[in-house]
Amino acid sequence: MKVIIHQPSKFDETATIVDNLKNRKPVVINLENIDPDLARKIFDFCSGALYALDGQIQKVSKGIFILAPSNVDIAGDMTAEKESASLYNWNKSE
Amino acid sequence: MKVIIHQPSKFDETATIVDNLKNRKPVVINLENIDPDLARKIFDFCSGALYALDGQIQKVSKGIFILAPSNVDIAGDMTAEKESASLYNWNKSE
């Protein structure tokens, strides 16, 4: 089993992220330190890819997400789950 | 495959974290929002457990770590790897 960590700094790098998801590996992305517009673009691209792959996204913290392909489940304690409720509002709350 | 997210608020919860590691599940911990002394204590306890289990820790961001049992590899892009170099100095840099 492998977990990949990505801290993309350019939009081009999303292809590598999605390649890892297609290879059924969970990816942790850190979008904390990049421009909010770029972060949004990368997040939306990854969301689309995961939707296509029947995967899921879980928020860990502001700007930090676990992207899980369909073979990977994500479980969390109460607080983390509560946080994730605001996931798809991430764009707006930025 | 399962990835667990924990956002512990009490030291007691470290037992659950370590139980997940013993069950060979990777755990993402978020220690961002708790008292630095407690965060350090939890981090040290988890470090000890992972050492015992031949696992590894990878820093994702300040206060956010992936704890991986021995059956789980962690790979990352250059930036994330560079960040993780400061991992065992986390206590000091807090």
Image (tube, coloured by chain):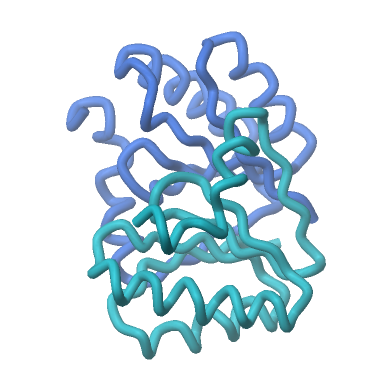
Chain colours: A blue, B cyan
Q: x, y (%) of residue A72? A: 66, 54
Q: Is residue B54 above or below residue A46?
A: below
Residue A58 lies left or right of residue A23; in this view the side is left
Residue lying at the far left in this picture: please name it: A93
Q: Is residue A62 above or below residue A17?
A: below
Q: Residue at x 78, y 74 (%)?
A: B54
Q: Residue at x 66, y 28 (%)?
A: B78
Q: Residue at x 66, y 47 (%)?
A: A70
Residues B42 and A66: in front is B42
Q: x, y (%) of residue B69? A: 72, 70
Please tell me in which quadrant of the rendered image residue A15 appears.
top right
Residues B29 and A14: in front is B29
Residue lying at the far front in this picture: please name it: B92
Q: Is residue B92 above or below residue B41?
A: above
Which quadrant is the N terminus of chain B positioned in? bottom right
Q: Is residue A80 above or below residue A10?
A: below
Q: x, y (%) of residue A47? A: 48, 29
Q: Residue at x 54, y 29 (%)?
A: A7
Please tell me in which quadrant of the rendered image residue B4 appears.
bottom right
Which quadrant is the C terminus of chain B positioned in? bottom left
Residue A18 lies left or right of residue B92; in this view the side is right
Q: How many marks?
A: 0
Residues B89 and A6: in front is B89
Q: x, y (%) of residue B89? A: 51, 57
